[in-house]
Amino acid sequence: MKRVQVVAATLVSAVTLVSCSTPTDAPQGDQAKTGGADVGQADAFTQIQPDPEVEALLPAGMKESKKITIVVTAGAPPTSFISPDGKTSMGLNADIGRALARTMGVEPTLVSIPLDGIIPGLQSKKYDMALASMSPSPERLQVLDMVAFTKGGSAVAVPTGNPKGLSSKALCGLQVGVAVGSFQATTRLPKLSEETCTSKGKPAIKAVELPDQSQVLLAMSSGRVDAAMADGPVLGYAQKTQNTKFEVLQDESSLTSTGGMAVVKGSELTPLLVKAMEVLHGLPEYQKIYEKWGMAGYALPADELGRLKG
């Protein structure tokens, strides 16, 4: 079985990006999973100026308040996690959120919660928008407007040495850990199970859903699950920064999805996000964010900008 060790690039600058006057970010519950970066090194994106065309699309209330509340997840570095002080949302998604806010000329507050709380939080108007690399499943698109901002990809991790000789096509009947509500849980693993197992008369892959991708890896290291499926960058970063020892199977390391930011369906913010993302994508800061987090290959191609459809 060919194996590849996915290595996350060392952080060019271990940072969290905060606005000059941004209120303290608010991680909630036990989601304060740290990625080990230094919150003291901050970048306020002051070089990004508000874009007049983006500002023109701000809803009246937001034009007046000059504030936006962005919900993100945690426990999945380098895309999303909490600073060591437990107060600041960090990672690629947080960086994208703060950069987008700069194009809008508004002050962002980021709140970190479990993934399965994001849609209820948007529907209750507790949060204005979500940046959580969510895939555009039919169920989500029934209640959300989603705007593309990143590529995503799944990878399968196994204990070091791959003692059971597993591959992504040899997981039938085994327990595979995934983060609850993730692309892997809702889409990729069920599809893989159907393609390689149930359609051939073999037992289905047993998905074991856990609160976040960090806990998925812990479950694998303790033997609670046979393998783990997560975002490729998350596994690469974990190999670099965590004590958990594992390897990534080469045959499932690929870009398989597009991640979207989200607002409630029919929101006034939808055209705002489309335009803000278009503007940010044209700035050098967009690619630099990906390079900083070791995810240069996951930047969204220009021809994939816009609203996501099922």
Image: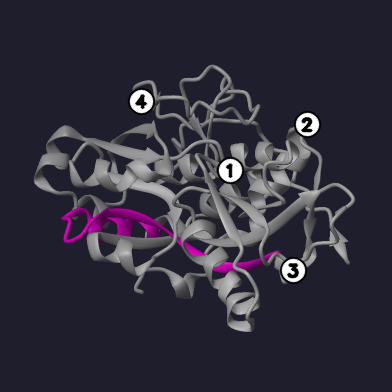
Label 2 crowding class (10 Å Cα cut-off): few <14, some 14-19, many 20+? few
Of discs 4 and 2, which sits in the foreground?
2
Compute the Cα span from label 3 to label 4. Answer: 48 Å
In the displayed orientation, state which residue is furthest to the top.
85
The residue at 73%/41% (across/down) is 223
Q: Secondary structure at mark 2?
A: loop
Of discs 1 and 3, which sits in the foreground?
3
Residue type marked 3:
Ala
Q: Which mark is residue 122?
A: none
Residue 37 placement: quadrant: top right
Q: Secondary structure at mark 1?
A: helix
Residue corresponding to mark 4: 22
Above or below, 300 relative to 69: below
Label 1 crowding class (10 Å Cα cut-off): few <14, some 14-19, many 20+? many
Residue corresponding to mark 1: 213
Residue type marked 4:
Thr
Ranked by sequence position, the earlier of labels 2 and 1 is 1
Percent coordinates x, y for residue 65 in the rendering: 16, 33
Of 193 and 185, nearer the camera is 193
Ranked by sequence position, the earlier of labels 4 and 2 is 4
Number of numbered discs overlaid on the protein picture: 4
Instruction: Check contact, mark 1 vs mark 3: CB within 8 A.
Output: no
> Which residues fall within the magenta stretch?
253-278
Percent coordinates x, y for residue 34 in the rendering: 59, 27
Q: Is residue 94 shown in magenta?
A: no
Residue type marked 2:
Asn
In the displayed orientation, state which residue is furthest to the left.
60
Of 157 and 256, nearer the camera is 157
Ranked by sequence position, the earlier of labels 3 and 2 is 3
Residue corresponding to mark 2: 243
Compute the Cα span from label 1 to label 3. Answer: 22 Å
